[in-house]
Image: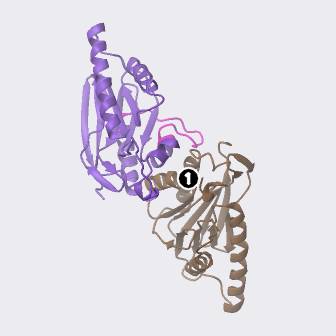
Chain colours: A purple, B brown
Amino acid sequence: MAVEMAMEPDYMRDPRKHHFSPYMENGGTSIAIAGDDFVMIASDTRLTRGFNILSRNQEKVLRLTPHTMMASSGCWADVLTLSKVLQDRITMYSHEHNESMPTTAVAQMLSTMLYWRRFFPYYVANILAGLDEQGKGVVATGASVAQIQPLLDNQVAALNMKGATPPKMTKDLARQLIHDAFISAAERDINTGDGIIIHTITKEGKTEEMVKLRRD
Amino acid sequence: MSILNYNGGCVVAMKGKNCVAIACDLRFGVQAQTISTDFKRVFELGPHLYIGLPGLATDTQTVLQRLQFRIKMYEMREGRRLKPHTLMAMMQNLLYERRFGPYFVEPVIAGLDPNTKEPYICALDLIGCACEPADFVVSGTCSESLYGMCETTWQEDMEPEDLFECISQSLVNAFDRDALSGWGAVVHIIEQDKVTTRTLKCRQD
């Protein structure tokens, strides 16, 4: 609530007052879906400021290690700084331990790093996705979360369906869900659009797919 | 805290093949406190004409009473049943009369034309701006979630059984993510020859 008020758009503030906010909302929506032996993470490529578009082509998923990726959105300045610092810490870990940092360790470190800034937070919404041979879970975050989250509850977790069990998550099903969720979100949310990049991580490696969204 | 979020609640309506569906949740609360779990906000105004009135609960009741009065006067004078499109026009007038001290409801209308049996849906804002889309309309505290669900699951020309599944899943999964809506749902499927009303039980929180 306090952060939202600090970031209210200029047409909502009293024009007679000076106002400085260290934060800015730059939009962005991400989805991550995990399967038994893969993880898929996708993010839209639009960067906004108020009703304006800053970029139609901004990659928001960061490759941290060969088997971990992170999608970040929110205040783009904080996204850049956080990802820079995180990448450096991960590199230092691999120098000290002579192995790349496991996904669970990255998650724990990210949590600590964010809490260090408890009283002047990074205004960043993160999803960390990676391979640890760990199974189910779906997370959505960012601008269109209200539109997308109930869809994932219903289709991935099979909530509110009598007698249904959660489907075995395959790459095709995950890709189709991500695709449909973003197409729908782009219809109804002004901050989502232009395109999405879907990253898939498996034991064999990573693949990337670019899907176009409506540009209005 | 917006006045439209004081009591909570939501309504959704969808068009199908020769049928329409309208559904609402059953929660009535005062901010975080739930007072009742059987507060319907969809009302029958004619054999195939339903209106949903989500928003401030006191205005839900008042607008319904004033509307019922106007409809009875209309049907007495005109000697015929109200068409859905005419109900929309009546609501626009009722709401705009209070332009600078509005009723805090954002109505949703669903029905079949009494003569042509054409399906009709529309949504209005609290001061009477109406829109009549071809697919679905949503209103209430979880309207964004409802937009996301409906946009993905709605298809054109769904039969009544499929429309029921679609509208039920859209509503229930959307209000499960909203603290101010839920505690059960009522779904009406309006076809040419009958109206089927079902009550859904879901997570009670």
- Magenta-highlighted residues: A152-172
Residue B134 lies in quadrant: bottom left
User: Is B93 left or right of A146, judged from the image as shown?
Assistant: right
The residue at which mark 1 appears reads as B142
Tell me where residue A98 appears, x and y as whole percent.
27, 8
Q: Nearer the viewer, residue B76 or A144?
A: A144
Tell me where residue A40 appears, x and y as whole percent.
35, 33
Tell me where residue A62 appears, x and y as whole percent.
29, 31
Does the rendering let one see residue A41?
A: no
- Give the overall secondary structure of the magenta segment: loop
Could you tell me which secondary element the residue under label 1 belongs to? loop
User: Is A35 left or right of B79, judged from the image as shown?
Assistant: left
Residue A32 lies in quadrant: top left
Identify whether A12 is placed above or below B98. above
User: Is B169 left or right of A47, judged from the image as shown?
Assistant: right
Q: Nearer the viewer, residue B28 or A134?
A: B28
Q: State yes or no: residue A42 in magenta.
A: no
Q: Amino acid at mark 1?
A: Cys
Q: Nearer the viewer, residue A115 or B80?
A: A115
Residue A138 lies in quadrant: top left
Tell me where residue A118 appears, x and y as whole percent.
48, 28
Judged from this view, the residue extending furthest toward the top is: A97
Q: State yes or no: residue A170 in magenta.
A: yes
In percent of the image, x 52 and y 76: which residue is there? B118
